Image: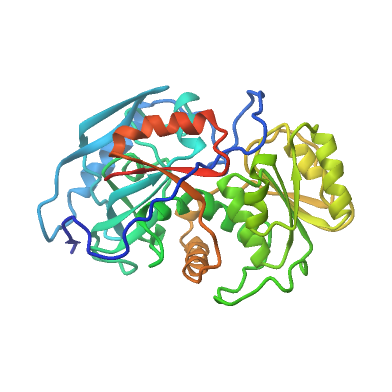
Amino acid sequence: MISAVRYPPPSGSLPRTHMACVQQQSGRKSTNKRKIITSFDLDVEKETTSTSATARVFKRRKISKSLSVKGPSTPTTQKALIVVRKGEYELVDTHAFPTLMNEEEVVIRNLATGLNPIDWKSVDYNFCLPAFPWVTGREMAGVVEKVGSQVTTCKAGDRVWTSTYYRDSRAGCFQEFVTVPQHTVLPIPPNMGYESAACLGVAALTSAMTLWKWLCVPQPSTTLHSTYAASGAEGYLLVWGGSSVTGQYTIQLAKASRFSVIAVCSEKTRGLIHSLGADHVITRDNKSNQAILECIRSVGGDRITRAIDLVGTDTAPFCMAALSKTAPSHFAPLAMMEAGEAVPPNVTLHSVEMKRFVLDKESRRYAESLNKLLEAGRLKEPVLEVLKGGLGRVREGLEMVKKGDLMGRKIVVSMH
């Protein structure tokens, strides 16, 4: 059976309003117009509308009608910002309610959603859009509205956050309700509000999974009083694009795992990066990428064994070149990288596919570990810029993300 709850949510910690920023390139914008590779979807083969895709959506909706529902009546329509064609949105009040397809799914009332570069890129360049109309948006926080009878990880009324997958329009976060698999639904730490939790599904989770799953970085202790006394015991880790929101979480998680961190950022964000624990900050202002590389090598020498690039094709080769020439090393280009780029024999190049969080149930453990660190106060949240007013503010926020130069802030849209 399925249980339900009515809004408003139960009392608890109220959303905290910070300043904010979006996960965005902190380096210079690349003018390269080759295939985009993103930290959330590295398999961004261009997709256009197709009759078969639409048919699959319709078929899934028919199946969902066989599920039993207990509790208040469910609305049949909702407000949503839909993509009607390449580069064009439409805000509607009559979008279909994202009904449950099986008893292991959860319906969440959307209270806040984070905005990311992939959100505008997919619409402007027409990829990760299986059909039209479609609902995008990759991360959100809210209150559980309904749960299937086999859901054991949460219940109606719980405060939760989630990270979603673009192939299911029901999970798109630019709508009033989303429906997602239960293993992707995590409790909001009691010391966080909805707006802060809405930033966890892309930047924070991408950072955690990139380090722990792909780059073989040991997971840190979640003890509140753990210190960085043994910092550097694991060697050097390089973050190129340190002031991006993903970069900010990466710096902190790497420090918690006893790495010495070298971060590249602008002079404007130097103070922010130092405050997050970076051991060495290399400013990129008025420097060529080769000059930046030389600065990095003068610090880390041949001891840099992990590197993450968050800027693009212009910086990825230099970031990889900073890695050790002799020791086994790992590189994750999370923004873009040229196909066919030569990779040194001692370097493992990782294609980070964040869809694994949704497709592989065991990946939930990374989100659970992230939650524990947040609850223990081990991680600083990014500065938020909250746009209040609901889905009508999403396009405005996406333009801010697209423009860039957010200096480490994260853009969040509040449904209040």
Left-right relation of 222 to 97 = right
Residue at x 31% of width, y 54% of height: 142
Where residue 41 appears, as percent x and y from the top left, is 53, 41
Q: Nearer the viewer, residue 247 or 227?
A: 227
Q: Quadrant of the C terminus?
A: top left
Colour scheme in use: rainbow
Does residue 40 appear in this view? no
Q: Position of residue 354 (x, y in %)?
A: 53, 49
Q: Can you say whether 279 is above or below 320 in the image?
A: below
**In the image: residue 135, left or right of residue 358:** left
- Locate residue 75: give its quadrant: top left
Rendering coords of residue 361 (x, y %) = 46, 61
Q: Residue at x 35, y 45 (%)?
A: 171
The answer to whether residue 177 is left or right of residue 350 is left
**Nearest the eye: 302 or 1:** 302
Q: Pinpoint residue 34: horizontal percent, then vertical percent.
A: 64, 25
Q: Nearer the viewer, residue 406 or 201?
A: 406
Q: In the image, what residue occupies the spot 67% across and 63% down?
A: 255
Count up the numbered dots.
Answer: 0
Question: Which residue is rendered at x = 70% and y = 40% of the image?
Answer: 267
Q: Does the image show residue 342?
A: yes
Task: Assign the N terminus to one quadrant of the image.
Answer: bottom left
Q: Quadrant of residue 106?
A: bottom left
